[in-house]
Amino acid sequence: MTDSTFHDAPGEEYVPEGDDKLAERLDAISEEEANLRAESLRAGLEDYELEDEDARLLLAAANDDFVEEDEVIPPVVAILGRPNVGKSSLVNRILGRREAVVEDVPGVTRDRVTYQAEWAGREFTIVDTGGWEHDAKGIHARVAEQAEIAADLADVVVFVVDAAVGPTATDEGVVKLLRRIKKPVFLIANKIDDFNQEPEAAALWSLGMGKPYPVSAIHGRGVADFLDDLMEKLPEHSAYGGMIPSGGPRRVALIGRPNVGKSSLLNKLAGSERVVVDNLAGTTRDPVDELIELGGRVWRFVDTAGIRRRQHMSQGADYYASLRTQAALEKAEVAVILLAVDERLSEQDIRILNTAIEAGRAIVLAFNKWDLMDEDRRRYLEREIEQDLAHVEWAPRVNISAKTGWHKDRLVPALDTALESWDKRISTGKLNAFLGELVAANPHPVRGGKQPRILFATQVSARPPRFVLFTTGFLDPGYRRFITRRLRETFGFEGTPIEVSMRVREKRSRK
């Protein structure tokens, strides 16, 4: 007995003979008749050797109902401090995993970044910020602005100081900022690795921010005591959120190779300079969440670090950023994949696209910098799309300019289409009626004197749609692709990957 999932296995294509008039044949079958056929086919499975997992799967597929409740937005804690004081190390210690990008170079974390954390049964959101630099110039000035915005939107601020260095002029600048904001503040004296160093923490009373907490973010010393006190100051839910309506805002990941315009697009959609943008490729190292109103609804956008190299070739911050990009994709529901039309589609573009497909996310292709396109480039691009993107011809396409905002309004209909397909469920009756009519008109080729049959089919889940076919033998790869293609044509799965797996089952031996 064998199970197998199939996508695009090699093999000859199945070419049907003539028009099978499938739509007309399905229209002629009533819902009641389709359900009766499906029940009969399901009963027929009793003649076959089924596994325990098969029974669980069939039972779960029959129960599609679920209830979504409103969700409370947890309180927000912003982590502030000048570069290289250990803010990201503290975030990782609180989370209990290596999530924030850490590197022994000032300014690795360049945008404010959110993480969901939990302590003593309480959930809260951590915002890790770029280093706050007093009188900073260039990109550092913009990093400082991000830190100020994060502090403005936080319920509680955690101010991290390097106790081994002591208070600096920059730390004094942060203190002035925090007094202006008037939020509860926890002062962390970091890098206190043992009891003998605690007098260094006491020196930070001079900042006038209350009791310094002696902490070693690297070793975990003192972090639990600080978190216990933090829980007492945290409100029940964020003063800047309240309740997320049932299901919450749909989650959109913006992905693409470095410098393709992800941050520019997010800023244009948000209507403000929300993300640090710099001409240096790979400026965005951390995913950044942003609630944005678009098309009259709120969406949660995640701007992700550019995937620049294969992971085993990446080093330092780039390595962790690429891992985090993948994590962001897994948390998203739909991926907007940005492709720059002024450059040839690259192997990297295709790899990023395939990562989204493998993650099972709904997909929208956004061709950016369309305003820079001339006729010559347009001809080459169409050829590249035909050649390199044939495997995602089902994905909605939007031509945009992230810089000017041209056609940004077309993103919402494309997102809606992709998400509707991603959420879609086909009833067991309809699915089996479809396969019955399809196979009757287009039978599987006979191989070695045998013709595998489809005994029964069910959709086991949505998001993305996953189907299981119980069969008497392996179906040819070309025939499997034919089934997938006709599923799309018949039920309109535009913008979502479809996963179809086979469970080859043998007849029970008669005693």
Image: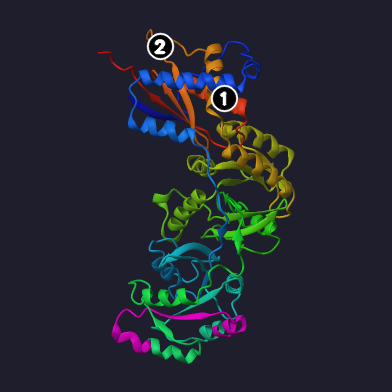
C-alpha separation, residue under disc 1 versus residue under disc 2: 29 Å
Q: Residue at x 62, y 20 (%)?
A: 30
Q: Residue at x 57, y 26 (%)?
A: 487
Q: Residue 215 at x, y = what percent? A: 37, 78
The first of marks 1 and 2 along the sequence is 1
What coloring was used for the rendering? rainbow
**Camera-nearest residue between 122 and 200:** 122
Q: Residue 460 at x, y = what percent? A: 47, 34
Location of the C terminus by quadrant is top left
Q: Residue 253 at x, y = what percent? A: 57, 51
Which numbered disc covers residue 447?
Answer: 2
Q: Is residue 88 left or right of residue 220?
A: right
**Camera-nearest residue between 392 and 443:** 443
Residue 172 in the image: above or below residue 356: below
Answer whether residue 181 is magenta in the image.
yes
Q: Quadrant of residue 290?
A: bottom right
Amino acid type shown at disc 2? Arg
Location of the N terminus by quadrant is top left
Q: Residue at x 34, y 19 (%)?
A: 506
